[in-house]
Image: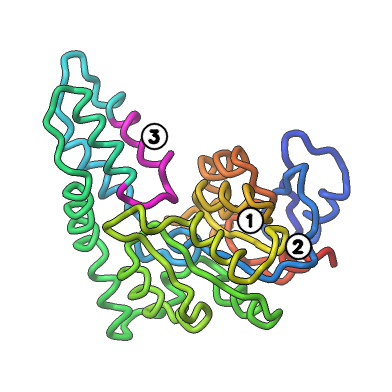
Amino acid sequence: MAKRVFMTETSSLTPRDTLAGRFIGRVEFADHFVPRPNIQHVVFDFDGTLSLIREGWPEVMLPMFEEMLPPVSGDEPAGVRAMLLDDIMTLNGRQTIFQMMKFAERVAERGGVALAPLEYKHEYLRRLEARIQSRVNRLASGDAEPVEFLLHGSIALLDYLEARGWNLYLASGTDESFVKREAGLLGLSRYFGGHIYGAQDDYKSFSKKQVIERILKENQVDGDRLMVVGDGYVEIEDGKNVGGLAVAVASDEANNGAGRFDEWKRKRLLGVGADIVVPDYRDATVLLDVIEGK
């Protein structure tokens, strides 16, 4: 298979293009990328970054919002839908409650009486659970193999990281009970041990920023020893804010294994400072070698 080089719009034939040429699949390096040979700690997002059990979640949240949003004079369905979808995706990566808080604001703007954001969240989770229940059941019964619901190359990447002796952490905007359940079903718990964190009903008690700060403090290391991997802007931004390396996963979840970028994710994640963008982990060994400067 011929190697494909995906270059940024501002790239010329530079050392970054030479790096990209080592990859079989697509990859993009930001101009500010610098290798980090001293990485020790890696924070992963979960949904869309490793797990695909919840693939299609916007198709649950968006119709619920459309159904519950009070109409106003002059509404055009396409415009309302675009507004709500932008709200949803802009907050992707944060705890689900923040999408519900934004929706409650939209309801109030239109003269409606908004429910408490936690009530919206619980209704959304009820609907989402109904959508994914068959996936969960198939995994639990052994009728489905975990690879069916893992982003392409995930296990290989985690194995390579483990072999390097890097410490792995999982931090998700999904409720912690669900993250732990689904990490177990996918065979991922062993990589993260007790370092699996997720959202709480008391949303102020958890954030990815808090997890990152705790890692640095407890290990007495600077941010240059940290790498974050995710498909949401939150973990990318939080990692960069402490001086970490950010690997953005612009995963096309509905077409796992196709090796294509989700262009919305790609542009969004580069915009908040991602160092490297990949669609999946088919080039896991090369990716880690490049990060280490090999």
Magenta stretch in the rendered image: 81-97
Local packing at callout 1 (Cα closer than 10 Å; few below 14, some 14-19, many 20+) is many
Q: Which mark is residue 291?
A: 2
What's the distance in space between the residues labelled 2 and 3, CA to CA? Answer: 32 Å
Callout 1: helix, strand or loop? strand
Q: Name the one closer to the observer, 75 or 119.
A: 119
As for residue 83 lying within the magenta part, the answer is yes
Occupied quadrant, residue 148? bottom left
Callout 3: helix, strand or loop? helix
Q: Position of residue 3 (x, y in %)?
A: 76, 58
What's the distance in space between the residues labelled 3 and 1, CA to CA? Answer: 23 Å
Label whose residue precedes the other's in the sequence (2 or 3): 3
- The quadrant of the image that shows the C terminus is bottom right
Q: Which mark is residue 86?
A: 3
Label whose residue precedes the other's in the sequence (3 or 1): 3
The single residue placed furthest to the left in the displayed view is: 113
Identified by mark 3, the residue type is Asp
218 in relation to 264, above or below = below
Q: Position of residue 81 (x, y in %)?
A: 29, 31
146 in relation to 52, above or below = below
Question: Mark 1 = which residue?
Answer: 247
283 in relation to 19, above or below = below
As for residue 157 lying within the magenta part, the answer is no
Local packing at callout 3 (Cα closer than 10 Å; few below 14, some 14-19, many 20+) is few
Query: Disc 1, disc 2: CB below 8 Å?
Result: yes
User: Which residue sits at x=35%, y=36%?
Assistant: 85
Q: Count all numbered tags in the image, as a single digit.
A: 3
